[in-house]
Every structure is written in structure tokens, then in C-alpha cells.
Amino acid sequence: MKSVAKELNKQKWAYIFIGPSFIIFAVFLIIPVFASLYWSLTEYNILQPPKFVGLQNYINIIFHDPRFWKAMVNTAIYVAGTVPTSIAISLLLAVAIDQNIRFKNWFKTFFFIPSITSIIAISVIWKWLYASGKYGLFNHALSSIGIAPVNWLGVDWTLPSIIIMSVWGGLGYNMILFIAGLQGIPQVFYEAAEVDGASEWDKFRNITLPLLAPTMVFVTIMSIISAFQVFDAVYIMTYSSEGAVGGALDCALTIVAYLYDTGFQRFAMGYASALAYLIFFVLFIVTVINMRLVEKKIEY
């Protein structure tokens, strides 16, 4: 016991310095995590004390809530639309920019700027680009070549419009990660392939893609998690003066937007907490499946 106390006394300054950080971490992360887990088992509207209902919130969400499934379908469409497209385009950009071309750093900066720009500012600008009639830039360009204007933020086009904007906004971040991965591939492999007469496509398929697999896995998992959590763009592009989020007929209602609507518009905090844990569970399952599918194909 004395030896433990002596050892703690030796490290007291370390605990003193990390103490404030640990307190902030506990107050703003650990405690809210466990508090929301408890609230997910209650009926709680902030104004009245929580009423314990067990798993009823989870049962209602899964079996009796059509808005939840509408939001899940929209989120799945958003993930399927943004993740593969963004990864494919950013990989092509990374391969092109990684060559010995002029103004390489300028191209990196040009494509990376949207990644460090506020999504709020990006959404506001794109909302102007998508303006209806002939006032939006896209519809003006379509009209100039004889194509009828598109209602970009209507029921049929709101979710695809958000997907297009998100793909554009996420290219730079993934591109930088792929460039870092490409620069870690030894040039000796490419030189050996050239001696054997391999074409550029052969080198890309047999050298670049296999050795880029760890980066590909990281980018894919992070992109899926980020896509599942999309909220800002949906909020800005679909918010109306009545306070509704998700657009007409919930055409672009995603799962996090539904969580916000439930918790902070309808003040059903218990129900919203259960939604948050279901989102966590879905992301955990998707990540595990993704890791299991690719772990045997990675060459480190």
C-alpha cells in the first residue's frame, strides 16, 4: 500500500496537469454518453422528469415509425451516391496530380479548398446555384442550351442535389489522403513493371490498387461514417420558415436530420436518444462488415 502511495506521489504532477482535460472530457463526452443511454430507455421531454419505459422507444422506432425508415432509406441512398462516386473521382484526381505535372501544388490547393470551407457557406452558395426558374446558375446554363429548367430543390431532385454538392465538397480531403498513400508506394515496383513491358493500366491495376488498399479502407470507412452523419447540408438546403427539416414529403430527410427534428423541434429527448444509439449500432455493424470484407485483401 505504501509503495502504491509512493508511486502516486511521484506522479502527482502528471495527474495535476491531465486533471483539467480529463474533467472536460468526462463532462462533455463520458457523462452525456451514459445519460443519453439512460434517456433512451425513458419518455423524456425536458419539462417533466424522465419516465422509465424500458425498450419501448426502440420498439416504436423499429416497428411503428415510418419516418425512421424513410430517413434510413434516404440515408442509404445518400451513402450509396456519395461514397463510391467521391472515392472514384478523388482517386483519379490523386493519380493525375501525383504525376510530374506543372502547377501540382496549385491543383492540390484548388481541390482542397472546399474541404476547409464551412459546410454552411458551401450549402448557402449551392442553394443559390440550385435556385428555381432561370435565376439559378445551373438552370440559366440549361436554358441557354434549350433545356427546360430543373426544380433542383423539389421533391424529386433535393436528395440528388445534396449528393452532387457533397461529392464536390469531399473530393479534396480524400484526394490528399490518396496522394499520401501513392507517395508511400516504392518506385522500384513501377520500374520493374516497365522493364516487363506493363502498360499504365496494368501498373495501376496490379501495383497501385493493391498497395493502396490500406488507404482505400481508411477512406471508405471514414467516408461512410461521415455520410451517415450528414446534417448541415440537409438542414441548410431544406429548412423552411415553418421549422421543418428534410424537405417536402421528407424527400431528403436523413437519419441525423430526423434525430435533430425529434430531439430539438419536438423535444422528445428519450426517443431521440434511442435514435442516436440505433445510428451508432448501424455504423458499428457497417464498419465491422467493411473491415471483415477487406482485411484479407490488404497488402501492407
Image: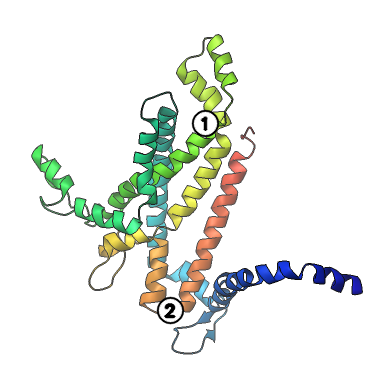
Q: Nearer the viewer, residue 116 or 224?
A: 116
Tell us which disc is closer to us: 2 or 1.
1
Which amino acid is tagged 1?
Answer: Leu
**At 53% from the left edge and 56% from the top edge, which residue is drawn?**
283
Mark 2, secondary structure of its residue: loop
Please rate how many residues cluster around mark 1, counting C-alpha atoms within 10 Å: few if below 14, some from 14 to 19, many from 20.
Answer: many
Q: CA distance from mark 2 to mark 1?
A: 48 Å
Tell me which label, 2 or 1, sits earlier in the chain. Answer: 1
| Closer-to-camera residue (137/282) | 137
Could you tell me how many numbered marks the image carries? 2
Residue located at (55% from left, 61% from top): 281
Residue 7 position within the rendered picture, expressed as x and y whole percent measured from the top left: 84, 68
Using the image as rendered, state which of residue 49 and residue 200 is in the foreground: 200
Seen in the image, is 28 located left or right of residue 64? right
| Residue 268 circle label | 2
Position of 89 relative to 208 (above/below)? below
Across and down, in percent, residue 60 comes to: 47, 73
| Residue 264, image x, y percentages | 39, 75
For the question of whether residue 115 can be seen, the reply is yes
Q: Is residue 191 left or right of residue 199?
A: right
Label 1 residue SS? helix
Residue found at the far right of this picture:
2
Rate crowding at label 2 as few (under 14), some (14 to 19) or many (20 or more) other CA atoms within 10 Å. Answer: some
Is residue 156 shown to the viewer in this render?
no
According to the image, label 1 marks what residue? 182
> Is 202 above or below relative to 20?
above
List x then y, in percent, for residue 194: 53, 12
Q: Is residue 266 above or below residue 200?
A: below
Q: Residue at x 44, y 71 (%)?
A: 64
